[in-house]
Image: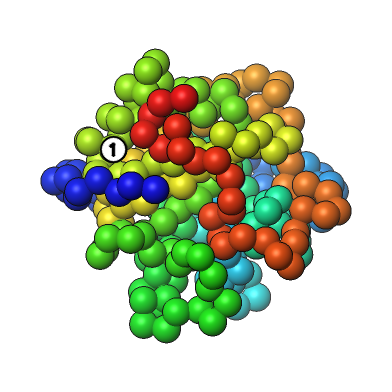
Amino acid sequence: QVYEPALPPAPPHPRRRACAPARGRRGESWGAMSRGGGARGTVMARHAFKVLCPESLVSTIMGARGATKDQIQDECGCKLVVSNRDEYYPGTRLRILIIYADENQGILSALDRVIDRIVECGEKERVDPSPHQREEPEFLGKEPGEYVLRACIPPKASGAIIGPRGTNIQAIRTEHNAKVFIDKTNVDGHQMLRVIAPAENLRTAIVRINEGVQEESRSEDFQQWSQVRNFGPGSPSSAAPAPGGGGDWGALATGGG
């Protein structure tokens, strides 16, 4: 893959606003809104976003006895659900973190906290690379100061993020100094996405990407997509490629395809 020269940084990320308490529809708590448990539990929420996480990122987001996760939920008005251990996105060693919220701001606020943890993990990786690291780092981009956020998105969101003739994805690249790559492989209605940028640019670029994901949030297809976090037996593999997977990224990496 060819990485373009760094562009001027995007404007600084605005100061965080205080988030509403983690309440669901009609004032219900998130606990009351969740039905069932494990991979089959259902969370009723209008908006959702899926982040793909190396194990160390999951640990950092959860915190001791889930304290960090609970804090993020309380501060951002969201629900965080993580796939079980050994339940990975197919072809990777990445677990699926789903952020649910009835308000879009809850998704964005939680993503901001996730990026904080990606930066934290990236700095640890810079000092002490993982001995299990294979083809590419888990959190660091090729250029100094770059970090990597991985997500999986619905195919319709892929079209919205790319835009007509690649206009939207190129705008993200130029306006936010962020490289966006979308795997063309469709895995049960999911496509892997990578965003590579300095931390503050990552924050602003993910706002644009989330807009594309939430365009279909009112549809039944989106609601069904939002509940999938277990891809069944055989998805993890001891011979899986590095964290980013081994899909076909080429055409969409530059906005074409």
Left or right position of 51 against 28: left
Left or right position of 111 against 219: left
Residue shown at the point (41%, 56%) measured from the top left = 148
Residue shown at the point (67%, 47%) measured from the top left = 30
Can the viewer see residue 109? no
User: Picture quarter containing residue 152?
Assistant: top right
Counting from the top left corner in percent of width and height, residue 230 is at 77, 49
Say if 224 sits above or below 50 in the image. above
Q: Amino acid at mark 1?
A: Arg
Say if 237 sits above or below 108 in the image. below
Counting from the top left corner in percent of width and height, residue 187 is at 69, 38
Left or right position of 70 against 13: right
**According to the image, what is the colour scheme of the structure?**
rainbow
Q: Residues within 10 Å of mark 1 (few under 14, many from 20)?
A: many
Farthest residue to the left: give it.
Answer: 8
Counting from the top left corner in percent of width and height, residue 74 is at 53, 56
Residue shown at the point (22%, 35%) measured from the top left = 175
Task: Give the residue at mark 1.
Answer: 173
Report the number of discs: 1
Residue shown at the point (51%, 58%) measured from the top left = 72
Can the viewer see residue 141? yes
Kindly state the secondary structure of the residue where label 1 is placed: helix
Counting from the top left corner in percent of width and height, residue 226 is at 67, 37
